[in-house]
Amino acid sequence: MTLVKWNPTRSLMTDFDRIFDSMFTHDLPRFSSTNSWMPAIDVNETETKFFLSADMPGLDKKDVSVDIHDGVITIKGERAIDDKKSTDGYRIRERQLGSFNRSFRLPDNVKEDKVAAKVKNGVLTVTLPKTKEILPNGRQIKIS
């Protein structure tokens, strides 16, 4: 037997309305004329490194580029239409096609010349080694 918390404001009619409304507000894939998409990216930090992990299923390393300029890392890529497959038979196509571009400002304690990237099993991993902690320049002023 399943216990359900009683909610005095809940009724059969409100449940029916919620179900009916969700049928028309369900997010269907929307394709814009710009043909762009955005991969999901996780940022992880350890004591010595930052890691950027981006989901890019179906992309090879030739389809992706990683650039650093003026303290900003930019990940660019493109998922092209496969000309060998016909698109006529699709009823629903949720996978996005086209180019993407993601940029992140790097912290001051990243060794930009030691950044490395690799793609494995559809995941791009960018390793950003840290420098020693940067302490702000300053000194104690004696109050007289």
Image (cartoon, grey):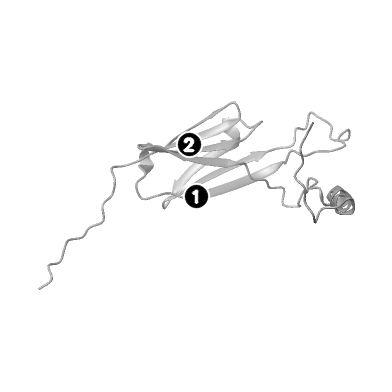
Q: Which residue is mark 2?
A: 126
| Residue sticking out furthest to the bottom | 144
Mark 2 residue crowding within 10 angstroms, few (<14) / some (14–19) / many (20+): many
Q: Secondary structure at mark 1?
A: strand
Contact (Cβ within 8 Å) of mark 2 with mark 1: no
> Reading the chain from its start, which is encountered first: label 2 or label 1?
1
- Pointer 1: residues within 10 angstroms few (<14), some, or many (20+)? few
> Which residue is depicted at the point 62% across and 35% down?
56
- Amino acid under disc 2: Val
Q: Residue furthest left?
A: 144
Q: Where does the image place residue 63, in percent across and percent down from the top left?
A: 60, 35
Q: Is residue 39 above or below residue 10?
A: above
Residue at image location 48% in from the left, 36% down from the top: 126
Rendered location of residue 91, percent (x, y):
88, 37
Residue at 59 percent across and 26 percent down: it is 121
Tag 1: amino acid: Phe
Instruction: Pick whichever, 108 or 117, lies toward us.
Output: 108
**Residue 120 occupies quadrant:** top right
- Out of 48 and 89, give the one closest to the viewer: 48
Q: Nearer the viewer, residue 51 or 32?
A: 51
**Res. 9 image quadrant:** bottom right
Q: Nearer the viewer, residue 21 or 7?
A: 7
Residue 90, position in %: x, y? 86, 35
Relative side of 115 to 32, left or right: left
Quick check: 41 left or right of 98? left
- Indicate the secondary structure of the residue bearing disc 2: strand
Q: Quadrant where the C terminus lies?
A: bottom left
Q: Which residue, given by chain and number where applicable, does mark 1 sit on?
A: 104
Q: How far apart are the alpha carbons under marks 2 and 1?
A: 12 Å
Instruction: In the displayed orientation, state which residue is furthest to the top.
Output: 121
- Tell me residue 112's x, y (percent): 38, 43
